[in-house]
Image: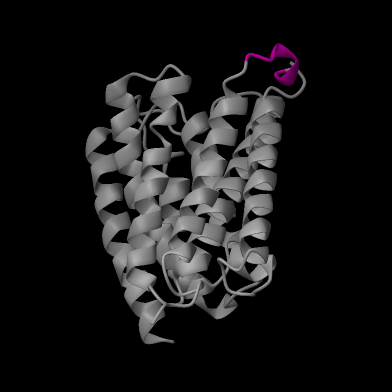
């Protein structure tokens, strides 16, 4: 007896294809030197366009998978988590909001605040919001959305592992040292567990995209990186909180 295309290996393979398409597009296009995409009036124009392109490619792949019968016949909007979701569950994200804002005050230099002109802050905000929407839609939206109904725990950890490994591209293409790269892979992985659990509980990626972009924005503009001890504490919390959110989401089904 054979399994249905939407209950066998195809949903998993489709999720992997979407995440691979996002990675190839983001790092392939993003690594091409194009000074025109970094104008003085909008330094993060290239970031916005790159993430917009990777989002479009991810959605196109998802549409093809859905049409081919690899994924359940649900709307792409549902799969992507482009819904309001369970607004009453947003309170579970308050600790995450506190962490994302904390980088304004936690820095090695001991100088609180954000550094940069108003123009830089606005440009960075646009770029980081684009990153948040693109990454959350591809990873916690489409990929996790394809498998989370039948395999919530496996879906959380599988998509999170791939999400963490996405960041190897920073070492391969963007000149990061391998020490920096593997640390980012680790922090992205625990971050992914937390946000995947939130996706299951809330049913939407919009709040996650905002928080993702907010955290990147505060970290980029803070006057110094957070101390290592604080980063470790955040990663530990994200891992535990993500497991809690996943368990609560499954119990509420």
Q: Residue at x 43, y 77 (%)?
A: 3
- Residue 249's place in the image compared with 79, above or below, is below
Q: Is residue 25 magenta?
A: no
Q: How many marks?
A: 0
Q: Is residue 101 visible?
A: yes
- Residue 44's place in the image compared with 167, above or below, is above
Q: Quadrant of residue 111?
A: top left
Q: Residue at x 46, y 71 (%)?
A: 200
* Colour scheme: one colour
Q: Is residue 34 magenta?
A: yes
- Residue 182's place in the image compared with 11, above or below, is above
Q: Is residue 108 visible?
A: no
From which residue to which does the magenta span run?
33-38
170 or 21: nearer the viewer: 21
Q: Split into 4 quadrants, where in the image is the N terminus?
A: bottom left
Q: Residue at x 40, y 51 (%)?
A: 99
89 or 10: nearer the viewer: 10
Q: Quadrant of residue 41?
A: top right
Q: Where is residue 226? Give x, y as percent.
A: 34, 34
Lateral position of residue 34 relative to residue 176, left or right: right
174 or 237: nearer the viewer: 174
């Amino acid at each position: 007896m054979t399994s249905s295309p939407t209950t066998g290996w195809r949903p998993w393979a489709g999720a992997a294809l979407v995440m691979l398409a996002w990675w190839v597009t983001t790092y392939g296009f993003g690594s091409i030197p194009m000074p025109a995409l970094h104008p003085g009036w909008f330094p993060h124009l290239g970031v916005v366009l790159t993430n917009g392109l990777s989002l479009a490619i991810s959605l196109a792949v998802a549409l093809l998978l859905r049409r081919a019968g690899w994924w359940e016949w649900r709307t792409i909007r549902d799969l992507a988590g482009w819904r309001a979701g369970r607004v009453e569950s947003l309170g579970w994200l308050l600790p995450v909001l506190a962490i994302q804002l904390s980088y304004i005050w936690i820095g090695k230099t001991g100088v609180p605040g954000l550094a940069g002109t108003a123009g830089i802050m606005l440009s960075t905000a646009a770029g980081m919001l684009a990153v948040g929407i693109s990454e959350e839609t591809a990873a916690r939206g489409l990929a996790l959305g394809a498998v989370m109904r039948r395999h919530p725990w496996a879906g959380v950890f599988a998509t999170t592992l791939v999400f963490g490994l996405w960041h190897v591209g920073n070492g391969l293409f963007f000149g990061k040292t391998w020490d920096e790269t593997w640390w980012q892979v680790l922090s992205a992985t625990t971050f992914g567990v937390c946000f995947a659990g939130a996706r299951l509980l809330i049913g939407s990626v919009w709040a996650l995209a905002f928080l993702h972009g907010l955290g990147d924005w505060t970290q980029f503009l803070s006057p110094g990186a957070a101390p290592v001890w604080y980063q470790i504490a955040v990663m530990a919390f994200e891992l535990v909180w993500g497991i809690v959110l996943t368990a609560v989401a499954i119990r509420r089904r």
